[in-house]
Amino acid sequence: MKGVEEHRESDTYLEKRQLKRGTAGWVLLAGLGVSYVISGDYSGWNFGLAEGGFGGLAIAAVIIAGMYLALVLGMAELSSALPAAGGGYTFARRALGPWGGFATGTAILIEYAIAPAAIATFIGAYVESLGLFGITDGWWVYLAAYAIFIGIHLSGVGEALKVMFVITAIALIGLIVFAVAAVGRFDPANLTDIAVTDAAGASELLPFGLLGVWAAIPFAIWFFLAIEGVPLAAEETDRPERNVPRGIIAAMAVLLVTCVAVLVLTTGAGGAAAMSESGNPLVEALGDSMWAKVVNYIGLAGLIASFFSIIYAYSRQLFALSRAGYLPTALSVTNSRKAPTLALIVPGLIGFALSLTGQGALLLNMAVFGAALSYVLMMVSHIVLRRREPQMPRPYRTPGGVVTTGFALVVAVLAVIATFLVDHIAALCCLVVFALFMAYFGLYSRHRLVANSPDEEFAALAAAEDELR
């Protein structure tokens, strides 16, 4: 293959890198999709109020919801055609070649390695606010979270997904409790209690002007961030070409409802100004009521659900890249329960180190940078494959085709730029890490790819079909 060097590994090599197949159906996958994201309903999104006010964040949320819906519909098609543990990396590898595939996988890894660190800081804030175990220093919480939940994942995917599903159900119940309690405290005046600035286009609804809408985009993404991880479960799913599309679309439907409810009711009950700097906005929006305490405890379940499931996501993305030789192959070896040991532990150590900064909002923006960059590359992949391989079997087809994914592509590009508006240092740090990964591939691993890994075989099949045309 031009620009890369491949070799075939033995059957033993692949036998040591096997995931447990047929574990999940579409309901579990829908739960996984909601689980990835649900912590974003409990904390993180509200920092966008400080960038755009309620109006700016609401407009950003509408735009981002449209982008994610288009993204999910595009990924549903791609996952039905190319069901493999690499998810977005697999799609881009087929469409954009080894460089494009690795770039996409790297962006996803940046997102998934950093997002749990951000969530860990929010978990720490909740634990401290509850006064649990007398803990006043968050690092103990971060360490316990990583150790316990990586340990559960090491016990096997079936056990992990079932635990995740239960925690996610509890977190959804918490959102329902919050919504019922918040309705009684809702005051429309609270939506616009941030002082109007002298920015261009500023008003009560848009206190930071039109630019505030753009700056709020990275925080609006937190309502849906990581749902694109559902296809990473493809190799562990029964009939993935059917169940992965159904699971990711069902999850998106649930998240659209929770986004609207949380944004409007939290701000209306607690006030935009107060919520813009809160570590646990849903709880503070309910004041000192009994329901606030209930939601506080259940909110911890929501944060844990996303933390737990994104650990699953980063391990599968790293597993796929390692199995194919893009990253050190030792990272993809699985244990007796078919769980990738080092792919779970190594990013966990990195995430724990990042969580010690305690900078949840900063880490959130860094995770969004990786996510938005991966969305750009995945939507380009969908468009390229529609144009170049129109006859490729697609059990599910995206409504609207390339128009749908083209819209997602444009908004994703704007989202990448928006991360620099919020914190250009954080975005530049991610860009440097991304460049280092690409340099590693260019100088070393592109000469050591594994030809008989599933993702490389998908690409080889496409190349063979092109030669026959």
Image (spheres, helix red, strand yellow):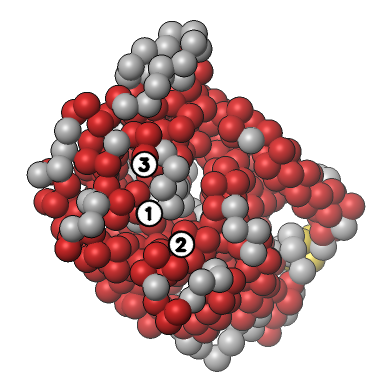
Q: Residue 288 location in percent, x, y?
A: 23, 57
216 or 103: nearer the eye?
216
| Picture mark count | 3
Q: Secondary structure at mark 2?
A: helix
443 or 261: nearer the eye?
261
Check disc 1 and report the residue beneath it: 280
Q: Secondary structure at mark 1?
A: loop
Q: Is residue 337 above or below residue 398?
A: below
Spatial separation of the CA atoms under disc 2 and disc 3:
15 Å
Check disc 3 and report the residue beneath it: 275
Q: Is residue 452 visible?
A: no
List the single residue furthest toward the bottom.
336
| Residue located at (51% from left, 64% from top) | 120
Q: Determine whether label 1 and label 2 are within 8 Å by CB.
A: yes
Instruction: Quadrant for residue 262, please give it.
Output: top left
Q: Is 322 situated left or right of 38 in this image?
A: right
In the picture, the quarter occupied by the C terminus is top right
Q: Determine whether label 2 and label 3 are within 8 Å by CB.
A: no
Spatial separation of the CA atoms under disc 3 and disc 1:
8 Å
| Residue located at (29% from left, 68% from top) | 297
| Residue located at (77% from left, 52% from top) | 437
Check disc 2 and report the residue beneath it: 125
Q: Is 45 situated left or right of 16 in this image?
A: left
Q: Residues within 10 Å of mark 2 (few under 14, many from 20)?
A: many
Q: Is residue 229 visible?
A: yes
